[in-house]
Image (cartoon, rainbow, N blue to C red):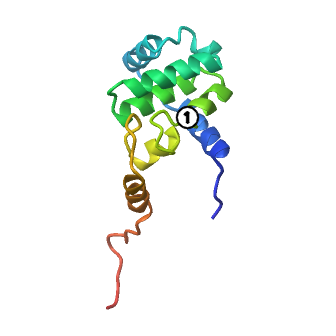
């Protein structure tokens, strides 16, 4: 099994996000949020506007699902290097980058303890047998 580094993980996420199909009303919702965060033109985002967006995400009460959709929408229009910066950010300061928080299901806007992070990783990697498997005891 190949283990991808953080840069490769971010690139894969960006590729997947670009395939996301949003309705016009969904685009409007996420675009409005991005604008509220201070990003006037996502296609011309800079490191500074990325930092502003990261701070805005940290201060909001958005669910992980909403944050993931904002990131997906932004990835469709923002430069890849800016998206990589956002995905690798740790806006809550718990040592887990944004992309991994979304994958693990830990709250992206709240500091998670090492115990919470370890428990989330354990849940992610638990073996679950298929339903119709025949097992001899």
Residue 36 is drawn in which quadrant? top left
Identify the residue shown where x is 42% and y is 28%: 58
Asked if 78 appears above or below 125 in the picture, the reply is above
x, y (%) of residue 84?
A: 62, 33
Residue at x 52%, y 18% (from the top left corner): 52
- Horizontal side, residue 55 vs residue 14: left or right: left
Residue 128 place in picture, x, y as percent: 37, 68
| Of residues 130 and 104, the one drawn nearer to the viewer in this rendering | 104
Q: Up-down: is 127 above or below 24? A: below
Q: Which residue lies furthest to the bottom in this view?
A: 137
Task: Compare residues 49 and 112 and report the one nearer the observer.
Answer: 112
Q: Give the number of marks.
A: 1
From the viewer's perspective, is residue 127 above or below residue 37?
A: below
Position of the N terminus, as image quadrant, is bottom right
Side (left or right) of 107 relative to 16: left
Q: Element at badge 1?
A: loop
Position of the C terminus by quadrant: bottom left
Instruction: Please rate how many residues cluster around mark 1, counting C-alpha atoms within 10 Å: few if below 14, some from 14 to 19, many from 20.
Output: some
Q: Position of residue 65 (x, y in %)?
A: 37, 35
Side of 16 relative to 118 (left or right): right
Pick the front one: 126 or 116: 116
Give the residue drawn at x 41%, y 12%: 32
Q: Residue at the location (63% across, 46% down)?
A: 6
Q: In which quarter of the image is residue 10?
A: top right
Residue 137 versus residue 85 in the image, above or below: below
Where residue 48 appears, as percent x and y from the top left, is 61, 17
Q: Quadrant of residue 62?
A: top left
- State the residue position of label 1: 89
């Amino acid at each position: 099994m190949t283990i991808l580094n953080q840069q490769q993980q971010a690139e894969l996420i960006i590729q997947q996000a670009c395939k996301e199909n949003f309705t016009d009303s969904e685009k409007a919702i996420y675009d409005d949020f991005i604008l509220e965060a201070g990003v006037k033109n996502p296609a011309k985002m800079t490191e500074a506007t990325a930092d502003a967006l990261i701070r805005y995400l940290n201060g909001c009460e958005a669910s992980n699902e909403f944050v993931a959709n904002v990131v997906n929408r932004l990835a469709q229009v923002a430069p890849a290097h800016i998206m990589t910066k956002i995905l690798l950010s740790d806006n809550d300061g718990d040592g887990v980058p944004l992309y991994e928080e979304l994958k693990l299901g830990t709250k992206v806007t709240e500091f998670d303890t090492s115990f919470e992070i370890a428990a989330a990783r354990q849940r992610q990697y638990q073996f679950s047998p298929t339903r119709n498997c025949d097992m001899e005891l």
